[in-house]
């Protein structure tokens, strides 16, 4: 499996927002990363509605 094709800056931002190590972001399968991002967005939407 190849590392994600994202910039270092993007990987750092994702690692910070998802609270996971940078190395884990770079080697995370794309479909799992997208699922985690969708989860994060749902949480943000829920917080904004409250």
Image: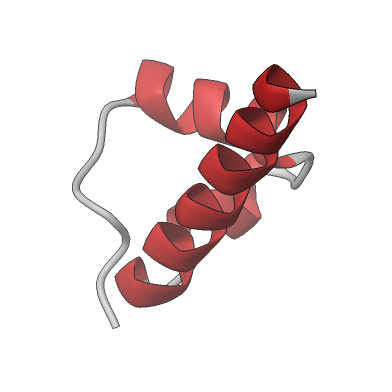
The image quadrant of residue 10 is top left
Who's the residue at 68% across and 24% down the image? 49
Is 37 displayed left or right of 1 in the figure?
Answer: right
At x 25%, y 72%, the residue is 2
Q: Going by the image, does 1 lie left or right of 20?
A: left
How far across and down, in percent of the image, does residue 21 sit?
Answer: 73, 45
Closer to us: 40 or 48: 48
Q: Position of residue 32 (x, y in %)?
A: 46, 73
Residue lying farthest front? 50
Above or below residue 21? Residue 9 is: above
- Image quadrant for the C terminus? top right
Q: Is residue 6 above or below residue 35?
A: above
Q: Nearer the viewer, residue 38 or 3?
A: 38
Front position in the image: 22 or 38 = 38
Along the line of sight, the residue nearer the viewer: 44 or 10: 44
- Colour scheme used in the picture? secondary structure
- As displayed, is residue 1 above or below residue 34? below
Horizontal side of residue 8 vs 2, given as left or right: right
Q: Residue furthest left?
A: 5
């Amino acid at each position: 499996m190849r590392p994600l094709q994202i910039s270092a800056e993007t990987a750092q931002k994702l690692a910070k927002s998802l609270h996971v190590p940078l190395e884990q972001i770079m080697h995370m399968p794309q479909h799992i990363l997208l699922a985690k991002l969708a989860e994060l967005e749902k949480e943000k939407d829920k917080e904004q509605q409250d």
